[in-house]
């Protein structure tokens, strides 16, 4: 496998109930930037990036690109 983030930039797994708009790392409360990490079969994992502290989170969401 390739292109999996590692080290300091590896996303932290989070569990989302209703809404995930507050960064657990720094307390920023106005939501996240979004990155799509391409997977196989035209799918992409959604990575949430805090605009303040740049911490990355993975909620287990997958987007279909087609
Ligand atoms: Zn943050």
Image (cartoon, grey):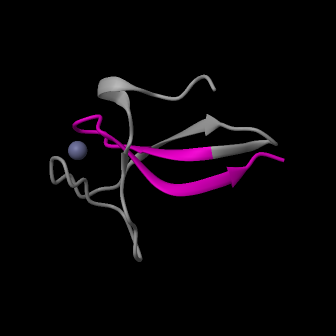
Determine the residue located farthest toward the front in the rendered image: 1
The picture places residue 27, in percent across and down from the top left corner, at 16, 54
For ligand 1, the image quadrant comes to top left
| 40 sits left or right of 22 in the view | right
Of 4 and 35, the residue lying toward us: 4
Instruction: Tell me the residue at 39%/40% (across/down).
Output: 11
Instruction: Tell me the residue at 29%/34% (across/down).
Output: 54
Of 21 and 59, the residue lying toward us: 59
The picture places residue 63, in percent across and down from the top left corner, at 67, 52
Quarter of image, res 2 = top right
Instruction: Tell me the residue at 35%/28% (across/down).
Output: 9
Of 62 and 6, the residue lying toward us: 6
| 31 sits left or right of 61 in the view | left
Instruction: Reply above or below: 38 against 65.
Output: above
Segment colored magenta? 45-66
The picture places residue 22, in percent across and down from the top left corner, at 26, 59
């Amino acid at each position: 496998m390739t292109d999996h983030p590692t080290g300091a930039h590896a996303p932290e797994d989070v569990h989302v109930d209703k809404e995930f708009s507050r960064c657990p790392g720094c307390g920023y409360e106005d939501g996240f930037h979004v990155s799509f990490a391409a997977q196989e079969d035209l799918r992409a994992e959604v990575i949430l990036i805090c605009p303040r502290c740049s911490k990355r989170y993975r909620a287990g969401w997958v987007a279909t690109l087609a």
